[in-house]
Image (cartoon, rainbow, N blue to C red):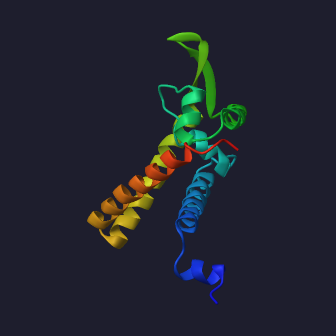
Amino acid sequence: MVTRAERNSTDPDLGVLAGRLLFAVQRELFTSLAELGFDDLKYRHGAVLAYLDADGVRPSELSRLSHQHKQNIGTLIDELEALGYVERRPDPSDRRAKLVFPTARGLAQMRAADLILAAMQRRHAQIVGREDYERFKRIFFQVTENQRGYATQLPDE
C-alpha cells in the first residue's frame, strides 16, 4: 500500500502542489526582502502587501482580494503601520471610511518585491520556456479562480 507521503512525493494533489509553491515563493521573496533591509516583515504580511496600491485601498477591499477575514486584515494593517510600511488616511469619497496607503518605506518594499517576483518568473520562464510558462500561468489562474469561487459558497469557519 502506498502511503500519503509516498503518493505526495510522486503524484502530489492540488493542495500539496499549491502549498509547496506558496511556501517556496514566500521563502525566496521574504529572504530576498530581508537582505534588502526589510527584515521585519513576516509571511503573513503578504496578505496586505500583495494588494496594496500607491493610491490607497480600503481594508474591506484588501479583505475581499486576499480572501482573509476583515479582523485578520485589520490586525495585519496595525502591524504594518507599527512597522512603518502603511498609514491609514480618510477616504476622500467617504470621510467615514479609511484608506490604507503605503509609506515611503512601503513603496520601496513594493518596488523591491515586484523586482524579486519578476526575476522569479523570468527564471521559471527560462527553464520551461516562455510560452509554456505563460500557458501554465493562465491555467493556474483559471484553476485558482475556480477554486476561490467554490470556496466562497462554503460556510465561514
Residue placed most toward the observer, 59 or 1: 1
Using the image, determine if residue 85 lies above or below residue 25: above
Residue placed most toward the observer, 3 or 124: 3
**Which residue is rendered at x = 72% and y = 35% of the image?**
75
Residue placed most toward the observer, 52 or 71: 71
**Which residue is rendered at x = 53% and y = 27% of the image?**
57
Please indicate whether residue 39 sits to the left or right of residue 95 in the image.
Answer: right
Report x, y in % for residue 73.
66, 35
Residue placed most toward the observer, 109 or 149: 149
- Looking at the rendered image, the quarter that the N terminus falls into is bottom right
Using the image, determine if residue 93 lies above or below residue 72: above
Is residue 102 at least partly visible in the picture?
no
Report x, y in % for residue 60.
58, 28
**Which residue is rendered at x = 31% and y = 59% of the image?**
134
- Considering every residue shown, the one lying at the far bottom of the view is 1
Report x, y in % for residue 3.
66, 84
Please indicate whether residue 123 sits to the left or right of residue 26 in the image.
Answer: left
Report x, y in % for residue 146.
44, 51
**Which residue is rendered at x = 47% and y = 25% of the image?**
55
Q: Quadrant of residue 70?
A: top right
- Looking at the rendered image, the quarter that the C terminus falls into is top right
Please indicate whether residue 78 sits to the left or right of residue 94 in the image.
Answer: right
Give the tally of numbered discs: 0
